[in-house]
Amino acid sequence: MSIELRNRLFEQLDQLVLIDPHTHINALDPSSHTLADILGYHYYTELSHSAGMPKEQIEEEGISEKEKVGRLIENFGPITNTIQYSWFIEMAQRLLDFDGDSVDASNWEALYDSAAEKMAADDWTETVFQKSGLEAVFLTNDFDDPLEDFDTSKYIPCLRTDDLVFHLTNPRTAVRLQEATDVNVTNVTSAREAIRKLFDHFTSKGAKACAISLPPTFAPVQVSDARAETALSNVLSKGTDADEADQRAVSNFIFWTLAENCRAYHLPFDLMIGVNRKVFPAGVFQGQDLYDSRVSLIQYKDLFNAFPDVTFPVSVLASVTNQELVSYSWIFPNVVANGHWWYSNTPTFIQHDCAARLEAVPRTKQIGYYSDMYKMEFALPKFAMYKRILAKVLAENFVIDRKWTEEAAVQLGTELLRGNVETIFHVGK
Amino acid sequence: MSIELRNRLFEQLDQLVLIDPHTHINALDPSSHTLADILGYHYYTELSHSAGMPKEQIEEEGISEKEKVGRLIENFGPITNTIQYSWFIEMAQRLLDFDGDSVDASNWEALYDSAAEKMAADDWTETVFQKSGLEAVFLTNDFDDPLEDFDTSKYIPCLRTDDLVFHLTNPRTAVRLQEATDVNVTNVTSAREAIRKLFDHFTSKGAKACAISLPPTFAPVQVSDARAETALSNVLSKGTDADEADQRAVSNFIFWTLAENCRAYHLPFDLMIGVNRKVFPAGVFQGQDLYDSRVSLIQYKDLFNAFPDVTFPVSVLASVTNQELVSYSWIFPNVVANGHWWYSNTPTFIQHDCAARLEAVPRTKQIGYYSDMYKMEFALPKFAMYKRILAKVLAENFVIDRKWTEEAAVQLGTELLRGNVETIFHVGK
Amino acid sequence: MSIELRNRLFEQLDQLVLIDPHTHINALDPSSHTLADILGYHYYTELSHSAGMPKEQIEEEGISEKEKVGRLIENFGPITNTIQYSWFIEMAQRLLDFDGDSVDASNWEALYDSAAEKMAADDWTETVFQKSGLEAVFLTNDFDDPLEDFDTSKYIPCLRTDDLVFHLTNPRTAVRLQEATDVNVTNVTSAREAIRKLFDHFTSKGAKACAISLPPTFAPVQVSDARAETALSNVLSKGTDADEADQRAVSNFIFWTLAENCRAYHLPFDLMIGVNRKVFPAGVFQGQDLYDSRVSLIQYKDLFNAFPDVTFPVSVLASVTNQELVSYSWIFPNVVANGHWWYSNTPTFIQHDCAARLEAVPRTKQIGYYSDMYKMEFALPKFAMYKRILAKVLAENFVIDRKWTEEAAVQLGTELLRGNVETIFHVGK
């Protein structure tokens, strides 16, 4: 009974046309050209590396795209259990007309060739959007992105701010900031002016969010202008040799200034909390980051209180932080639970975390899912995974346990998948 | 199969007459007079506030009870998914003969009026007790509560001690203490005398527990009398201006003294571990507290070792602490797992936490549930939620997975719901 | 449908002949002689103690084995719900032909006598191996174990190193080390020499792993030889009076030296992370340890990076650390997820942790289970518990949710249970 019910709910949720509220899509080159673009995704390279494939073999320079794909697939044996592998298979089946249910040495080349042919079509990106049930995607734009030459209603800009908050120690950041804003940042006043100009630029180009990823140690506080002045001066002149306290003060000053601009420009501020960068420096590209799950949203107490008018869609990296996210979203009007991020984006954690949110966070304050993808082809299998889990939770915890009608359950799922993206980010209506 | 089995187990568990081992009931006014008493419960006001209703609208002074209820219900749309909303509906259906399955602008007024009529009956409280399958409830009494004019075998006193441990910095606390005990607390000796008198008073009135809620940073240790003397003197004279170390020493001294009296007077000491108060000061009444889930029962190691003769029913605020609670209850004879508290009192967390306890903590050392309610009407839906989950866990993890008979499963559930409350708190036999 | 499916998968997994990769078996006396050997297992004594049986009654000196068993079983009432009790019943049923489903005052004596008779058979150990589907077991050998007089291909030595890392403060440890290696450890050079000799000895006797259990505070770092020299000198001369910083430096120096030898001798280094010893000193034998779940694998970042050629099978004590274990195993090629340890070795935690690993860690990097047993009779019920849960997860999350064939699911389970033990520890092929 429950499986048929799940399937019925899934089918309904799968009809929806969605806006993906967080991706790393390059608006100027959104979809893949060969399977190398697909399998270059860090999930495949890092899992293959973890399973024993040497980094030199994965990232060898000068090899052809086809050679790279062949090497990876022929080493896929140890990772066929992973959900990431299943994303690849489902993507191949539904977007590339692949009719197998596994890839290996015997069949990858035919798939590679047929994929390359399909992807060469002029309307491939449009096909992917359409088959994936997507209408638009949010981008992750560097602060100095010109945001030109693309349709910003389909590729919605989002101001990503990690570099500003954490890498002003790098002289290149200040240079990029000056190039982007014509402001030479030397002090608190000019820093504020530069940031204001970024928000001007981004919102004029249709940006709908500001975003940042944060290490587990970060605990934002407001610093005085005097403290910020000294700290900024030291950080700009000494770079990474500046005192750690000064670096932290600058991070806090910039972060707080971003929040002030989110308030002024009416942008939600996506907080992605909990990542430690370069924990495994010998890892493959984008496969080096991990985390310390000992983090608490209490670290964001001052922020949430200081900016009641700013909406904070919060993602947490570890499932053990999900209950805090549930509770803080349940209490703070400006905190919203946002998707299932990275190391928590696998079925067991999604199911537990999604179920906990659905029963205790107002239904208007939950963004069900975002793909976090780098290439358009991943939206389909990632959203399909999520929709199956959502259908399961709605079936078991609402229709069966709480005797909801199927219609009511689908309506709730629809809000998580589509409606709340519209209302929270002011898009697509 | 499993659903019919769950239902059969639930039906059996639902026959039991229970004693609710932790509530905030006012013995002099235990049940509601209108729906405003029901919807004034912080779960509804804080969720409505979180979902966007202004605090000024929720807590406006001078509005009628009916107006308040109307405002809240007409804004219930965003919280209809929550388990708290379902408590309200089930309560209305089973206690107020409400025959809908949702409330909104179209039907709340009729419900309000019929509720007011029912609640005006002389025997309303008795009706609620009877329909809820309740025989008695534990109270949460301020230390200076006279405990008079009610039946203490039905409304069982419990000495709540947060003020003594954490708020002696407030001069009003010392005044209240003197008024309650005729002891002017000026030093260690008089503090001990005053506390002893409170235990005398409470136990003479049939108190069956001492209780306290504790912040995640608290780690009780015994302090010397000399240290306590200095600290107490400073705290009594300087209030919140006293050194933090002195405040902590006083908290430890008082807390330890409470444990000593629990030993002397044979009272279990309920520890409710993990809450940070006033994290969201702009929140509605009782909707301002949250937590930092980074807490460990290792902080209570000295206490558990020092008082082997005191039973500590322990509640944890976050589900991530539940495994420690399981393990500490499995090892320490004097630690008992107690209910599913507040932010962990939603189905997903209850199911996971309850299942983990059932398979590893001695069956005699688990108190299944308490309602934590402020008004009698909430026992029914809250216990019903718990009993359904308990029935599910017993069905799936015991009858199906471990091939227990249904009788044995019901027997285990009965101990959690009733028997252990009797043996642990020495009541109801 | 799902239950029949689970049963089918279980039946297949239950056919496998296994190697148990972590036990505390005494190779010279591997199986039990009476039920006292079985019920002396700390799980039974500590649960009985927790449930109210006085330690003096459990551990009274001079009582007969039969008396001890009688006392424990007659007090089993409060722990019949625990999974540990179910291990005992299943063991009795399947190894001792017990035909009841509970033990109490009415039937324990007959079981005791028939058990003693069966266990007295010359081939009892062999019978247990065979009925349990076991081919070999890993031991936990003290560093000064002579490793003589047993078949090291059946009882596979494992060098346990807690004493070396944490108890060089005890003069007895240095004496034992000298006796085992003929090296008088006085400084860094002789310490290295002694440890090298231990690895020589152990690997010459067929040791296949080095292992250690670690407190949650431990965060290994490399210390300079100069620092180690000073610290070692202080620790050897002052014992537990040495500065804590010196003790920590010695622990780090020895730990790092062990890892260097694991690299040189190609031994996996089992890390069992998270236990606090003697939290409850009044507890029964081996029933005194607990934990602080606030631990992170980030503490092992330097180690994992410094020894890419050493395989680290990692066990975590608390389920809240399991997601980190999943993520670190997914990223670091040299980190392997190992079994379900101690307080996480109960069905609810196993199911959640196992499911999370199966979908995100390469299938070659997961060791499904080890028994951790002290007597051979426990392998059967413990592995049976695990295999049932594994079958459930494979059935629900792979066959049903991901449409895997049953054959593919059994193949995955087989790797977790057998194949990976072979490849990771280089045994049994």
Image (cartoon, coloured by chain):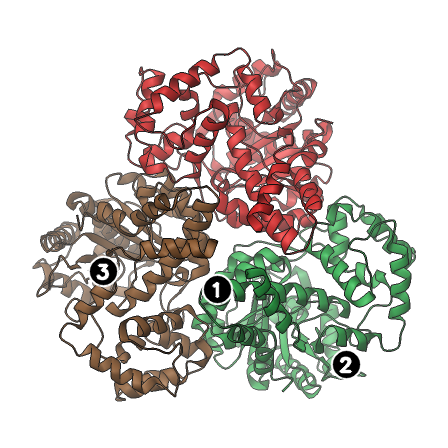
Chain colours: A brown, B red, C green
Amino acid type, mark 3: Leu
Dot 1 alpha-carbon crowd within 10 angstroms: few under 14, some 14 to 19, many 20 or more: some
Given residues C256 and A66, the one toward you in this image is A66
Q: Nearer the viewer, mark 3 or mark 1?
A: 1
Q: Quadrant of the C terminus of chain B?
A: top right
* Residue corresponding to mark 3: A134
Residue B209 at least partly seen: yes
Q: Is residue C256 above or below residue B252?
A: below
Q: Nearer the viewer, mark 2 or mark 1?
A: 1
Q: Nearer the viewer, mark 2 or mark 3?
A: 3
Q: Secondary structure at mark 2?
A: loop
Quarter of the image where one finds residue B251: top right
Q: Which mark is residue C49?
A: none
Q: Please state if C339 lies on the left or on the right of A22 as rendered.
A: right
Residue A299 in the image: state x and y as whole percent.
38, 47
Q: Are marks 2 and 3 in contact (CB under 8 Å)?
A: no
Dot 2 alpha-carbon crowd within 10 angstroms: few under 14, some 14 to 19, many 20 or more: few
Q: Which mark is residue C146?
A: 2
Q: Chain of mark 1?
A: C
Q: Is residue C130 above or below residue C217?
A: below
Q: Secondary structure at mark 1?
A: helix
Q: Secondary structure at mark 3?
A: strand
Residue A1 in the image: state x and y as whole percent.
48, 53
Amino acid type, mark 1: Ile
Going 53% across and 67% down the picture, which residue do you hit? C394
Q: Chain of mark 2?
A: C
* Residue corresponding to mark 1: C400
Amino acid type, mark 2: Pro
